[in-house]
Amino acid sequence: MEQRVWTISNILSALRIVLVIPITICLVSEFPYHRYYAAGLVLLAIATDFFDGYLARRFHQVSELGKILDPLADKIAIGFIAIVLVVLGDVPLWYVILVIVRDVLILLGAYSIKRRKGIVPQSNLPGKIAFTLIAAVFFFCTLKIQKLSWLTNGLLWLSVIMMVVSLLFYAQRLFVGRNFHNQ
């Protein structure tokens, strides 16, 4: 496995963390079309999540750092944006608590696996689907288009289901000790 630090995929993961700053500025500001700029930046953050993994595999640059940085960037970006959206009243507090608790549990489980087995487990497919749905919820909450509230609510509940499913898959890794690699 390639162990370079500054790979394209690791830079994209780091960029996802940095994008939290302009997204937050756009959300809390009151300039024309500020919500659309924020939503565009959210889409850019989502794109970095897709391309970092794709490029790491495509160019054989999967690294231990990348296996940590990618999900950590997801959790930082999602967590911070979620808190801003709660403060603005755009997303329910219970939902954000669920997202953050799930992510903390996953991080603690991954840390435990790393300590016991000496490997960093990769994200699983249900986890990736859950992340994509959470990102979609935050994207539509960022846009704040009332006519699309039915879609936002549907995505919210679908993401709750996938968060539970993915947490069960991660728990299986922790307690059964199998499926450490990407599924």
Image (tube, rainbow, N blue to C red):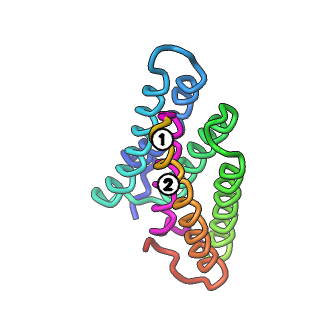
Q: Residues within 10 Å of mark 1 (few under 14, many from 20)?
A: many
Name the element at disc 1: helix
Q: Residue furthest left?
A: 58
Residue type at mark 1: give it. Phe
Query: Is residue 54 on the magenta stretch?
Result: no
Q: Position of residue 100 (x, y in %)?
A: 67, 53
The residue positioned 28% from the left and 56% from the top of the image is: 59
Query: Is residue 137 on the magenta stretch?
Result: yes
The residue positioned 59% from the left and 72% from the top of the image is: 170
**Quarter holding the N terminus?**
bottom left
Read off the residue under disc 2: 155
Q: Position of residue 140 (x, y in %)?
A: 48, 41
The kind of secondary structure the magenta stretch mainly shows is helix
Q: Position of residue 44 (x, y in %)?
A: 40, 38
Residues at circles 1 and 2 in contact by the CB criterion of under 8 Å: yes
Residue type at mark 2: give it. Leu
For residue 164, above or below residue 10: below
Task: Please tell me which residue lies in front, 49 or 23.
Answer: 23
Name the element at disc 2: helix
Read off the residue under disc 1: 140
Task: Please tell me which residue lies in front, 66 or 153.
Answer: 153
Task: Please tell me which residue lies in front, 140 or 43.
Answer: 140
For residue 164, above or below residue 39: below
For residue 165, above or below residue 75: below
Start-end of magenta stretch: 118-145
